[in-house]
Image (spheres, rainbow, N blue to C red):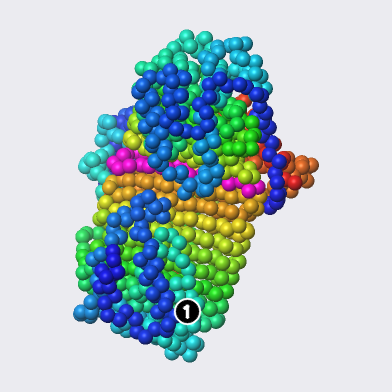
Amino acid sequence: MTSTELSSILSGPRQSPAPDWFRELQAKAWEEFEAEPFPARGNELWRFSSVKNLALDDYVAAPVFSGDPLSLARPRQFPEPAGRMIFANESLVRAELFSPALESAGVIFTTLADALEKHSDRLREHFMAQSARLGSAKFAALHKAVVQAGTFLWIPRGVEVRNPFEVFHLVQGDWAAVFPHTLIIAEDNSQVTMLEHFVSSNPDERGLGCAVNDLVLKPGSKLNYIGVQEWSRNFVSIQVNSTVAQKDSAALNLALNFGGKYSRLESVSRMIQSGARSDMLAISVARDEQEFDQRTLQDHQMPDTTSDLLYKNALHDRSRTIFSGLIKVEPGAHRTDAYQKVRNLLLSDDAEANSMPGLEILADDVRCTHGATSGQVEPEELFYLKSRGINDLSAKRLIARGFLNEVVDRLPEERLSEYLHQQIEARL
Amino acid sequence: MSTTTDSIAIDRDIGNFFYNVAATRDAGVGLTEQTIDYIVDVKKEPEWLREFRKNAYHVFNSKPLPTHWAGDELKEIDFNVIRYYLASGEAPKRTWEEVPEDIKRTFERLGIPESERKFLAGVEAQFDSEAVYSNVKKAVSDQGVIFMGSTDALKERPDLFRKWFGRVIPTGDNKFSALNSAVFSGGSFIYVPPGVKVKHPLQAYFRINAENFGQFERTLIIADEGSEVMYMEGCTAPKFTTATLHSAVVELVALPGAKIQYITVQNWAPNVFNLVTKRGLAMEEAEIKWIDCNIGSRLTMKYPGVVLKGRKARGEVISIALAGDGQHQDTGAKMIHAADETSSNIVSKSISIGKGRATYRGLVHVPKHLKGCKNNTECDALLINANSRTDTYPAITVRGTGNSTQHEASVSQINAEQIFYMQQRGLSEGQAMSLAVNGFVNDLVSQFPMEYSVELKRLIDLEMEGSVG
Amino acid sequence: MSSIVIDDLHVSVADKEIIQGLSLEFSTGEIHAVMGPNGSGKSTLAKVMAGHPDYQVTRGEILMDGVSILEMEPDERSRRGLFMAFQYPMEIPGVSNANFLRAALQARLPEGEELDAIEFYQRLYQKMDLLDIRREFTGRAVNEGFSGGEKKRNEILQLAMLEPTFAVLDETDSGLDIDALKVVAKGVNTICGPGIGILLITHYQRLLNYIVPDFVHVMSEGRIVRSGGKELALELESKGYDWLKARKPETVGAN
């Protein structure tokens, strides 16, 4: 692809007045994007991936959203959010902070554009500061160069926000490309949860969702991030997550993947100070010819850090999943506890699950295990359910739902898991 | 347990000696088409093989070094200073008396003739490029079992040899299988007739004696329907200062109902690059089991595999790797399921000592529309020192609803409390470590024939004694 | 009154015949015990009645109120009123006990009719109290991480909730200590009555101290070799099974 073709995405001013450092960053990112080669077969980081899906030639900038975007968001809304922001085709439709107490406590919940204007220094330190290591550097550079719709959430020291912040990215129009961005900084001993939705208005429209979320956890903080990806079944979705956890902080990242014909999720957790912890969770429900391609890194840089990954895939029809995960324990990161588990439930004879769970351990006194299983509904389990009068189809559904629920049940907040159970239920 | 040791005295001295032996057949240094012509001419091989070798030579040149796997260590190999064929020009002898004195004393010192008398059904001993001794007990040959060097088999049993040669591992499988296909010499050929169960193991011993040398044996084992055979190989080389290359290709064919067990105890000197391709083809209800133990070498890259081609075929890889300071054991297994109700099992245990690195690399493939296939993989790594390293890189593909796979891996270290407990009972730290490590691999070691498991325990003891200081 | 008639039943697993011509009848309002040594085919009988796919009926019949159930799927048999308490209940990860029971009860309602959630919980809690089961149990995944006793109590809870016409209890006493056994027996005794027929499969006489059967059958080598009243169980207790093995079947069936 040449830059003139991509200029269709860039048509018009992409950014409201931004500081020079940001403009320079974007210009440099554009060069990086152009210099980086496209993922090709034979590249280990894209092993098993259908890279043919990644051509960018036909995408255009998202047009103006027609109709009522709120009606698209409404059935998905969390009952009592702390704040809510809705973007429709990259334009802000609504931004609300429901508790005045949050504002007086100094919480910042705003758009990227606004943050560039008012909180430039805070943004500058953390905005895409971590490199995309798992293969999508080209797409991360593109995102950086053209990002427009984004959220900046900053939780001051010691502030605990119980209700989740909620952000919607809605898209409409054939071949629309969107670049949702989220940056969350949890200061010392703060607590926060973010619930983010990616929704297409039409289940058939083609499109590109190239999203980045960066989570920064300062000492003693707790941050939960939940992303629900419901792009259309013809979308190409690329999501790049970076979590950086400082001393005694605890991150939890849960991805619920439903949409897209090809969805790539790259998630990196870096435990950069002792006592840091990261829980990495994902559920993918793959149907038709969907492909979910998930790459993870649990990077233990310091001693006494913990990470726990559980990814579950339910595969229907002719779908494919790819999981490639690495636990890396760097030299000196002693007393690391790291776990990684991927489980594939094959519900069709044409489905395919690829698992590459990996370990690289360069320290000792560690506890590391990983496991990957692929299987189907166990006949004995099925018989047990049927012996209680539940028919074959319902029994299989119940087992599949239970299989996925196990992941959601790991959330620390019951209202949230209850809400997600309902959301999953509605989509199965 | 973090016992830091800067230099670890590794005792692998069982094979670290050499006697000067003059070779009259020498292909010279470096690899060109002329090298291949020399080998073909001196071995008086048929023209089809000249063509086969030259084609392989081009494939070898066209393939990049697989440095993205094991790393840049491979670049230390200088293919231009290696000698690709060295031999005395004499046919292998049937009795040890006939073996030239200077060669015989090497094998005497390694204890091969003694083992043969005690418990083996047949022995082949290879010295650099060719077998110098090859003998199978009469009771075994009377059953129709063929056990000879590959060089002889090519001449004497071209019918059997050519039928399967290169069928399990094609030339282009990887860079080193191509290299072997270009310059192979020596290795064993075994044919076991239908229904024959060979009671005692057949053994081959591979010895590298020369410096700057590459050993490229080629082994082919065919177990006909319902037959059973166990093959063991051992290997050593003196410790030279320059890199030595060992790059074998081993193909196994287990016809319906046959069983092959292939046991390797690899104890190459720490300058040897051991880049080996091993694969078996298991037909209906056949069973192939690789028992693979890697102790020596600078770098080993070896992933024994089984293609499960017939219904109810079974494949197994039992692997032990000991990576000492400066060593990289990059080993693993491949299981290709290609028929219904096939099952495979992989158990891998590795121990990393000092700056040693042990890597498990696995491939399990269950393609479309098969039913009742199962794989179970277990990898356990033990880290002895704070700077030891271990990696695990499996890749598992499963399609459809009738199959199941399970992979589990864990990393652990020696429990300091355990060591303390044993020390309190009067054991030295080194003894306690040996006991603990032996305990870690014990369930696998017990699958080796007695003579080998004793040897293995001894090697582990030596290794552990050296690792604490 | 409903009845189950098993007539000249032959059952094979993987080409091996386990049940070799078994006949047995029982009706609602009755408690029957089937006893026998290990390997006599007791558990096979339970599984084949419930319709386990691994068991092939090669000859004979199982009739429920005159209708053959052999061609029916396990869920259809269940909805018709046949319940089996498993010797080794399955764990169903991620599916809560409450959701599981609701799904099972919902499956019994006509299309379009919804289970009343409030009523459901009232009944559930009542039965749980009866079986000494704590409230938080409803949110736990089915049998996951349960002790042996908890699993067996859960089987009886399901029995109580699903209210079948016939219940086959496969070695429900195995692995239970005396206190757990009493709780389970209490549960079963509460359920007993004119509306239900119970078949207790057990190795030991012990259970029959707490649940008193009307009839006792002894199984050996895939057949019923002797039938009698509850005193037969005591006789077995003192003499063991061996004295019956050599004998030909005297009475076939209970009545």
Q: What residue is rendered at 35% in x and 54% in y? A: A40
Does the segment drawn in magenta span residue B373?
yes
Q: Residues within 10 Å of mark 1 (few under 14, many from 20)?
A: some
**Depth check, front residue: A189 or C102:** A189
Please indicate whether residue B391 sits to the left or right of residue A403 in the image.
Answer: right
Rendered-image quadrant of the N terminus of chain A: bottom left
The amino acid at mark 1 is: Arg
- Residue named by callout 1: A124
Q: Is residue A236 visible?
A: yes
**Depth check, front residue: A348 or A298:** A298
Does the segment drawn in magenta span residue A385?
no
Residue A91, quarter of the rendered image: bottom left
**Depth check, front residue: A108 or C74:** A108
Magenta region, residue range? B354-377
Q: Is residue B191 visible?
A: no
Query: Horizontal and vertical percent for residue A42?
Result: 37, 50
For label 1, the SS is helix
Q: What residue is rendered at 57% in x and 21% in y? A: B23
Please indicate whether residue C85 sits to the left or right of residue B207 in the image.
Answer: left
